[in-house]
Image: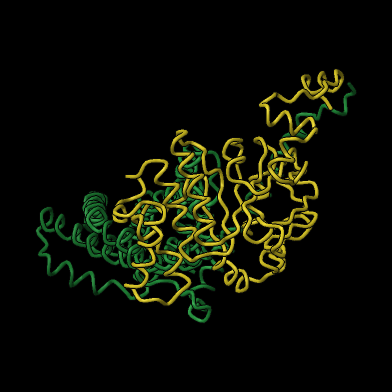
Amino acid sequence: MSESIEKIPVVEVDNLVTHYGDRKILNGVSLNIYQGEIIVIMGGSGSGKSTLLRHLLGLHKPTSGCIRLLGKDITKLNNQEMYALRRHMGVAFQGGALFSSMTVGENVMLPLREHTKLDEQTMQIMTRLKLELVNLIGFEDLKPSELSGGMIKRAALARAVVMDPKLLFFDEPSAGLDPVAAVELDELILKLRSALKMSIVVVTHELDSAFKIADRITVLDQGDILMTDTVENVRKSDNQRIQNLLNRMPRDDAVDTDDYLRRLTGYN
Amino acid sequence: MDESSRPSLIRQRVERLGIVVVRGIEESGYMFRLLYEAIEWVVVGKQRQQPVRVTSIVNEAVQIGIMAVPIIAVLCFSIGVMLAIQGIETLKTYGAEAQVVLGIALSVTREFSPLIVSILIAGRSGSAIAARIGTMQESQEIDALRVIGINPVRHLVAPIVIAMLICVPCLVILGDVMGLLGGAIFTRIDLGLPISVYFDRTFEVLSVDDVMQGLIKSLVFAVIIALVGLANGFQVQGGAEGVGRSTTRSVVMSISLIVIADMVFTYFLNR
């Protein structure tokens, strides 16, 4: 992203606190994402990155804090306003989440059917256009169960971008894929950004993929954002926890003997 | 370690009972909310430009209703025959075999047909609904619907509830006919009573209220099957095993609720 362009925030997260039951997952997370950039939210399992994504998608209500997408605070929107905002958001889920009862083509076409009043012919063309983009043309009449893992992810991506959203969210693009398919998907994400000029939020724990596609990386650990910066600066960071994550080192939390015994015996 | 950190057995039991009660209330509240939202979408969906689609209702109705026709016909016919056998056998002791017509007519229309149909639909469709919704929940398809902007209640819940409300009463009418036919055929064989005479007498003794009683109950059962299946589906946790557990739970729960609701409604409808 060139510095000369004025930075317009498309996602503004301010002091987001969330709980799962009684357990606190995010402890006041703040994050800005700017137009046209690819930001990677990185962290190990249990870091809260999936939770952060689910809140960005408006699937849960946070305990406190606010989330502004394209300038609108989604914690305060009513159903109709949220419905209107969803036209500008695309999401590709980890397992694809294609509707198993529909064909690939119908899956990709569904957002168009829902949000537009285009005629069948136009919708067909727009669907094929997006399938072409993800290299899945000719597969539109297959059911999701007949596709390979990589193809499912690409079909999910086609469905996510069929409305030409301003904001694209991608959960774990390379999870469960072989290295070649993972690299292809990374290429595809970069291609999409240059072709469709969208802002892309990718959640992943894959370092190679993160370094390859990211403009900026946000490192999340145990519910806190450790840093949000360019790939270079994240690599250079002297934060121990970030270095552990980058070097695939196990966490070496100091062991409190009393606490350990208490946990073993089960008495608090 | 002091004693107070180890709760007594009684306290544990009471605590567990409390948890179960609260969960039960929570769950029934959840089901009523599903029902309320489903009705809301049916009423105002058009205004919101997001109507409940007729094609989805038809698809559900085919699955729930049409596909169940053969099995319902066979089961209710068998029930009719069974009632005739038992009725004739018992009434013989009083020499009143001919009264079997009344017995079959009332018990089929008021009790057996609604009960058998509902239990079958709970086993056949209630479980399928729980499994389907549960699988969709696990594979994030429900989340995908929501992020596309398709309300899951409108897209999944409303069509199923409506289809259930249409199909179960229709199947009960089919069950009534097949049950009476079963009774008629066995009575013809055993007592030599002509089938036309059997039906003439049946219509003499049978009032509209008897049939309505069965139909009113079947509407309640339809709502129970739909809501229990849906709620169990949406609450699935823990992968394939969780889906299996929810499916079983939904069948046991809806059949239990149907039988209990039947008792309650029969009591009030006969006062």
The vertical placement of B43 against B259, above or below, is: below
Residue sitting farthest toward the right: B2
| Residue B266 visible in the current orientation | no
Residue at (49%, 78%) from the top-left corner? B49
Where does the image place residue A210, in percent across and percent down from the top left? 61, 41
Compared with residue A89, is residue A143 higher up or lower down, i.e. above or below?
above
Which color mode does the image show?
Answer: by chain
- Indicate the position of residue B50 as horizontal and vertical percent values: 48, 74
Query: Dividing the picture into quarters, in which one does residue A85 lie?
Result: bottom right
Quarter occupied by residue A223: top right
Q: Which chain is yellow?
A: A
Which part of the image, by quadrant, shows the N terminus of chain B? top right
Residue B85 in picture, x, y percent from top left: 21, 50
Along the line of sight, the residue nearer the viewer: A151 or B51: A151
**Residue at 61% over, 35% down:** A207
What hue does chain B carry in this figure? green
User: What residue is shown at x 68% (from left), y 45% (from top)?
Assistant: A217
